Structure formats: C-alpha cells, structure tokens
Image (tube, grey):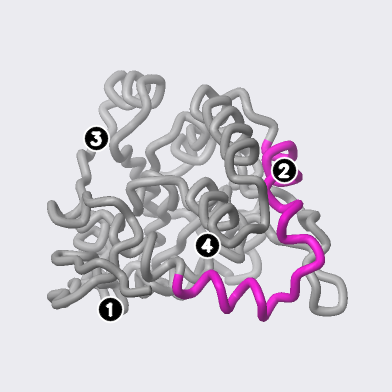
C-alpha cells in the first residue's frame, strides 16, 4: 500500500475553494462584496504567480470568520459544498481516486486552504484523511488566526512529514497530484509526481522531467454556473463522491 496524495484547488475541483467561499461570505452579508472580492482576486493572482505570502491571504480571508462559532460555520459550509463545490469536482479526479483505492493505496488530501473548507470537501469526495491550514479556536469560537505550520509550499512537506511520523507511514511509492508551481517542493520528493491542468511554470518543469501531465475535466453539464443543485447523479466510482452529471436550479 502506497500513499496517493492530492492537492485540492484546481486539482480535484475546477476552482479555488477559498475564493469561492469568499463569494459565499459576500452572499451571506459577512463582507462588502465588491471590495472584498476585488482584494481576493488580487491575492489569488499573486498566488498564481508564486508571489503570495499565504499569511497575508489567511489574515484577510479569516477576518469575516472571527467571532463565529464552529457550529455556525460548519452549518453554512455543508450546503455550500453541495451547491457550489460538488458541481465542479473533476470527474477524472474521482476516477483517479477510485483507481488508487482499487490498488489499496491510502488517500490523503493536502491543501493550502483552511480545514473548515478542506474537511467537508474531502468528505464529499469520500476521503477521510486530509491536511489543511488549521484555524485557531478559542472556547469554540474562531479567532480569525491560523494555528501551526501553514500547508503551503515547503510547509506542505513539514506538515506531511509530521503526519507520516504520527501515522507510521512513509513516502515509498507515493504519488502526488497538483496543478501549481507552488507544489514543486513536494512534487520533487515523491516517487510518482503527476501534474493536473498545470500552470505554465509547472508544465515546463513536468515536460523537462518526463512527469505525467493530466488534462482533467468536469462532467460537461456541471460547467454551468456553480450554485445549481445536483439531480439524478450516477454513482461515482469513488465511495462518497458524486460529481454532477445533471443539474437543476436550486429553489429558494
């Protein structure tokens, strides 16, 4: 049994869950939509170029969550995952996960997004084990701060090594799937690096090193605007994962 490790944003889903949650916070009235989403786009653009200080993004994105209870946030995240994330799950990702499960591999998601989002999305994919940026909690209330090492760039390696030690696992025969140049530190450490819909820098690196390059897609009908509720969904080969095949507008 080997590890099959997956990045989340733009690897398992066609989008960035943190930015999509920012849009949801605007819909909820937690933030001023125009200014908040403009700043989110600026920071995400820096991320795409490998210039983002993740601490800056987390401080920005967690400010609206500060002072809210775990239960309140969890209650709102769950339907958001169903309505806005499930339609953009890559069906090819589900097939890939299923293939690894068939081989007996252990599946792990590791993401530079907060665990309040990563956990529910991983669960929707039928994946129990995940690492993300931990959020600080005080007496059951989010403080708006992060806790511990951020799972970003080299931080992913640090957190993964801690997890491996805790779980008495190792990276022998491990695979890692990612779309981003920011994950190069981890990609070069595993035996089987895979790139998914890569950014230009990562594509160039993959081509030079002969790494597999995957072009993953969503089911055709799920390319509609997120916010549509799934209906008549055939079973995904991955237990717990149901990528959208047919969608209906959500009723108010």
Query: Which callout, 1 or 2, points to the residue nearer the camera?
Result: 2
Mark 4 or mark 1: name the one nearer the start of the chain. Answer: 4
Q: In front: 34, or 194?
A: 34
Per the model, the C-alpha gap separating discs 4 and 2 is 18 Å
Q: Position of residue 246 (x, y in %)?
A: 14, 66
Q: Quickly name the residue at label 4.
A: 118
Q: Are marks 2 and 3 in contact (CB under 8 Å)?
A: no
Image vertical order of residue 16 relative to residue 75, above or below: above
Query: Which callout, 4 or 3, points to the residue nearer the camera?
Result: 4
Q: The C terminus appears in which quarter of the rendering?
A: bottom left
Q: Quickly name the residue at label 3.
A: 213
**Visible residue check, residue 109:** yes
Instruction: Provide the secondary structure element on which disc 2 rests.
Output: helix
What's the magenta region? 54-79
Per the model, the C-alpha gap separating discs 1 and 3 is 25 Å
The label number, if any, that marks residue 40 in the structure image: none
Q: In front: 115, or 33?
A: 33
- Toward which corner of the image does residue 27 lie, by quadrant? bottom right
Instruction: Provide the secondary structure element on which disc 3 rests.
Output: strand
Per the model, the C-alpha gap separating discs 1 and 2 is 35 Å
Q: Where is residue 113 in the image (x, y as percent from the top left)?
A: 57, 52
The outermost residue toward the right is 139
Q: Quickly name the residue at label 1.
A: 239
């Amino acid at each position: 049994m080997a590890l099959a490790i997956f990045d989340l944003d733009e690897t398992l889903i066609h989008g960035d869950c943190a930015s999509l949650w920012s849009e949801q916070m605007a819909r909820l009235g937690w933030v001023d939509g125009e200014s908040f989403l403009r700043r989110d786009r600026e920071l995400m653009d820096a991320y795409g170029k490998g210039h983002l200080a993740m601490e800056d993004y987390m401080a920005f994105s967690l400010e609206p969550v500060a002072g809210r209870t775990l239960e309140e946030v969890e209650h709102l995240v769950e339907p958001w995952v169903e309505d806005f994330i499930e339609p953009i799950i890559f069906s090819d990702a589900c097939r890939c996960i299923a293939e690894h499960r068939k081989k007996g591999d252990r599946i792990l998601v590791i993401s530079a997004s907060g665990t309040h989002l990563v956990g529910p999305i991983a669960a929707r994919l039928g994946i129990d084990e995940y690492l993300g940026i931990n959020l600080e909690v005080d007496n059951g209330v989010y403080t708006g701060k992060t806790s511990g090492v951020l799972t970003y760039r080299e931080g992913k390696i640090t957190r993964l090594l801690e997890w491996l030690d805790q779980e008495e696992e190792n990276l022998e025969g491990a695979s890692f799937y990612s779309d981003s140049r920011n994950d190069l530190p981890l990609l070069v450490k595993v035996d089987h690096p895979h790139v998914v819909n890569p950014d230009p820098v990562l594509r160039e690196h993959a081509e030079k090193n002969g790494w597999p390059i995957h072009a993953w897609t969503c089911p055709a009908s799920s390319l509609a605007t997120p916010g549509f509720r799934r209906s008549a969904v055939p079973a995904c080969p991955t237990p717990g994962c149901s990528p959208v095949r047919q969608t209906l507008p959500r009723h108010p």
